[in-house]
Amino acid sequence: PLPPPIAEPRDVAYPGTLKLDIDATDLDRRVYRIKETIPVAAPGSMVLLYARWIPGTHSPDGPLYNYSGLRISAGGREIQWTRDTVDVFAFHIDVPRGATTLDIEAQYLTPVESDQGGAAMTREMLRLNWYATALYPAGYFTRRISVDATLKLPEAWNFGTALDVASSSGQTTAFKTVSFEVLADSPVLAGKHFKKIDLDPGGRSRVTLNVAADAPELLEASRSEEHTSELQSRFGI
């Protein structure tokens, strides 16, 4: 038999704000540890989706194969989930009575060998694509789903992203609320050796080149007047 239908996305706001917490400190195993909270309004059948179409790609190839160890609970009680037999990017669950949130734990396993894909985490730097670490509720446009995201980095690391920072405490940074769509299109580059280069000092908008390197001396870069003029001409800065 075919699985239950998946609700088509609607242009209405999802009730509540998702919370996504990523711990990126496990450099030995190169694993992102994920905690996510999804508010729910009523009991019953619900479908959670993993990003299939992602920015900058031309096929439905979201990296689901590296999303691992999924556990979903509500009120401290584990909820069984079922993978859709047609759309493998969909997970069916039954929200129990009295539940107000779903608590999700998972891991994203980044490549550790070259034949597994491009490196996303090393002992010196990492690249975090938020869409690879999150589930979201079916039935809504992702631009109508709000998310509060936090990121914990190794000690003394710095980062660059298009997201605006809401607060920082120790190794953890909280970002301002954005839509799931914006979050998916706002990767993080972070590293032990990190540098931000302002490409348009005093300009109308922030234009920053974020650089991470394997060693501090590799961060050194120069900018000639010729290159500056070329940038200003090409990009209007």
Image: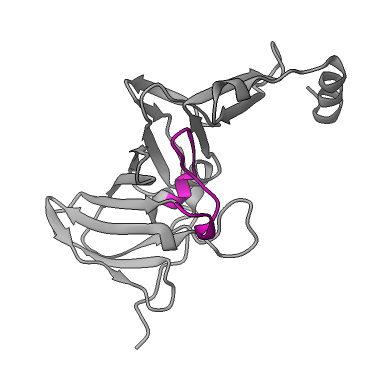
Residue 36: where, in percent of width, then height? Answer: 30, 46
Question: Camera-side residue: 53 or 40?
Answer: 53
Q: Residue drawn 32% across and 45% down?
A: 33
Q: Residue drawn 87% across and 19% down?
A: 226
> Where, by quadrant of the figure, is residue 88 drawn?
bottom left
> Can you name the residue that lies furthest to the bottom here?
1
Q: Looking at the image, can residue 138 be seen?
A: no
Residue 80: where, in percent of width, then height? Answer: 20, 66
> Where, by quadrant of the figure, is residue 221 drawn?
top right
For the N terminus, the quadrant is bottom left
Residue 198: where, in percent of width, then height? Answer: 66, 18
Q: In this picture, which residue range is highlighted in magenta?
A: 112-132
Q: Residue drawn 38% across and 37% down?
A: 149
On screen, residue 182 above or below 226 = below
> Where, by quadrant of the figure, is residue 3 drawn?
bottom left
For the C terminus, the quadrant is top right
Q: Is residue 37 magenta?
A: no
Question: Camera-side residue: 9 or 1?
Answer: 1
Residue 58: where, in percent of width, then height? Answer: 65, 61
> Can you name the residue that lies furthest to the top here?
202
On screen, residue 69 above or below 20 = below
- Horizontal side of residue 11 vs 1, given as left or right: right
Q: Looking at the image, can residue 44 be seen?
A: yes
Q: Is residue 130 magenta?
A: yes
On screen, residue 2 above or below 153 = below
- Horizontal side of residue 97 vs 37, given as left or right: left
- Horizontal side of residue 196 vs 24, given as left or right: right
